[in-house]
Amino acid sequence: MVFIVKKNIRGKEYYYLRESRREGDKVKSICLGYLGKTQEEAEKKMKKMLKREKEEKKGEMKKTSFELKPKQISIDEMMNFCKRKGFVFLSGEIYGGLAGFWDFGFLGVELKNNLKREWWKYHVQEREDITGIDGSIITHPKIWEASGHVDNFVDVAVICKKCKNKFKVDESELKDAVCDKCGGELENKGKFIPMFATQVGPIEEDSLRAYLRPETAQLIFADFKQILDTSRLKLPFGIAQQGKSFRNEIAPRNFLFRSREFEQMEIEYFIHPKKKDDCPYEIPNLKVLVYSAEAQLEKKEPEKMSLHDALKKGIIKLSWHAYWLATELNWFFELGANPNNFRIRQHLPDERSHYSTDTWDIEYKFPFGWKELQGIADRGIYDLSQHEKYSNKELRIFDEETKEKILPAVVCEPSLGVERAFLVFLFDSFFENKKGEIILKLPPKLAPVKAAIFPLVKKDEKLVELSKKVLEDLKKEWNVMYDASGSVGRRYARNDEIGTPYCITIDRESIENNDVTIRDRDTTKQIRVKIKDLKETFRKLLNGEIEFEKAGKLIK
């Protein structure tokens, strides 16, 4: 039995989905997930979660009459697909390009913006404990001295004497390092700071040496007091930021996975330093592959378990970490990512930063292996204390409860690369039909083009006129496109390949009955909807508030 419960946490109302399960003679109540801050929002999310859980129990994706199967492709094949369809291409390619820099085309920029918009909505707009900033890309160089990037963010450039592979290694690993491709002997090419340097000021002798930021986090710490003084936040709270970062990688590789210019979506979550394991939020009963440090050291396989159990067994040390791991995984899953391609991996003791008690990575199964997608680390008071020291400015705050001045600790730093999330949704959406045609099953909220509008006959002036009228009406809210080139079947296939979830066709019946045909990408089923109801129906379809077959009159 599942039901919605309302909880009051520190004066604010939150809704959760709970389930009662009988275990022997006892009935156990389990939290399945967070549903939002209103009853209406909770009921909508409950329907989605129950539907997803039902599909997962069957061990398969949603069955449709239009048979589709996932298509496995390499990272190079994905790169070629993105170039061919207008998602992403090498920057400055007409001049030979510049390794590690990518430009996003007319589809890529829409998908990227949709990703960032959904992340911001989920993490900032829908919460009352997180606010946001947009910090400068170039900032005072002292910030990077305080953070340790200038002195400690140093790598050694190496080149394989045998295969000429170029990469970087930590100085401490140089003695025993070999080529990661062929195992050959390495040549030391010297140390370097992987930050892009620049000069601030037009006259060289009077200019200031500065850096393009290698991460977004430090501006949050440097601006901490300003943000707190103006936002009226109280512990625990988070500060979020999206924006560009730059790292002068020796060998950018795997398309968007490792590049020199990239975007981050990041949160620094602050708590009272003496309340490190006092998470007031319920932790969803989410199951995922858990790769503990112990399992890695003993060469064991990851184990699928609930985050509750991982916390209870002491594998995950902090309840805050279990909460944020569940929160971040749910963001991907609610948007349609495949849970079977995710796992969490605990950092080994020698991987963790000296100030961290526990660090976890959310990893994704890319074509080139399990790789980090998002980090969940506790940074303690390290960053704020460093900025206090270097700036000689007090960053401590007065705690009303304990009546003392404290330096808040960062218990979690959910940090996600936009481009890596971009790849996740492309790979998870890559399907093909029986004809071998690509169907990009992007979630409607993320799809670059929400609908394509067709006149059935492109030379019929009345059909074209009505199609353009529908187009202009929908364009006021969504990115939709007009397509009159080729047969209707060819137009369907072209839009399926770029992830357009719905195609709207205007035919002679549309003139007579004031309605249109909407075709669903994933099932090829079609419904008729009155033009006067089209906008509201389309909104409900995109938001997942109504099933396609119930959104209009089904055409059989």
Image (spheres, grey):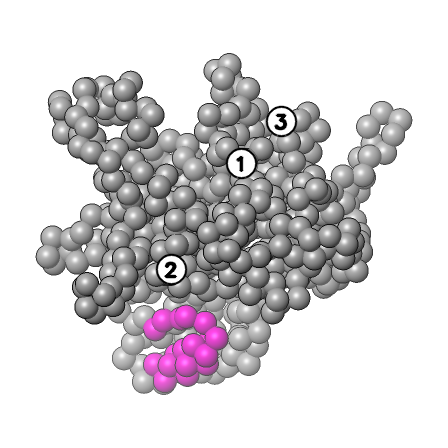
- Magenta stretch, residue numbers: 464-482
Above or below residue 230? Residue 285 is above
Residue 140's quadrant in the figure? Answer: bottom left
Numbered circle sitting on residue 355: 1
Above or below residue 190? Residue 470 is below
Q: Is residue 269 visible?
A: yes
Mark 3: few/some/many CA within 10 Å (<14, 14-19, 20+): some
- Which residue is under mark 3? 315
Asked if the stretch drawn in magenta spans residue 469, the answer is: yes
State the quadrant of the N terminus.
top right
**Residue visible at 44% across and 63% down?**
135
Asked if the stretch drawn in magenta spans residue 543, the answer is: no
Most common secondary structure along the magenta stretch: helix
Q: Is residue 453 left or right of residue 279?
A: left
Q: Where is residue 552 shown, x and y percent of the image? A: 57, 67
**Residues under labels 1 and 2: Cα distance?**
24 Å
Secondary structure of the residue carrying tag 2 is loop
Residue 378's quadrant in the figure? Answer: top right
Q: Amino acid at mark 3?
A: Ile
Q: Amino acid at mark 2?
A: His
Numbered circle sitting on residue 140: 2
Q: Earlier in the sequence, mark 1 or mark 2?
A: 2
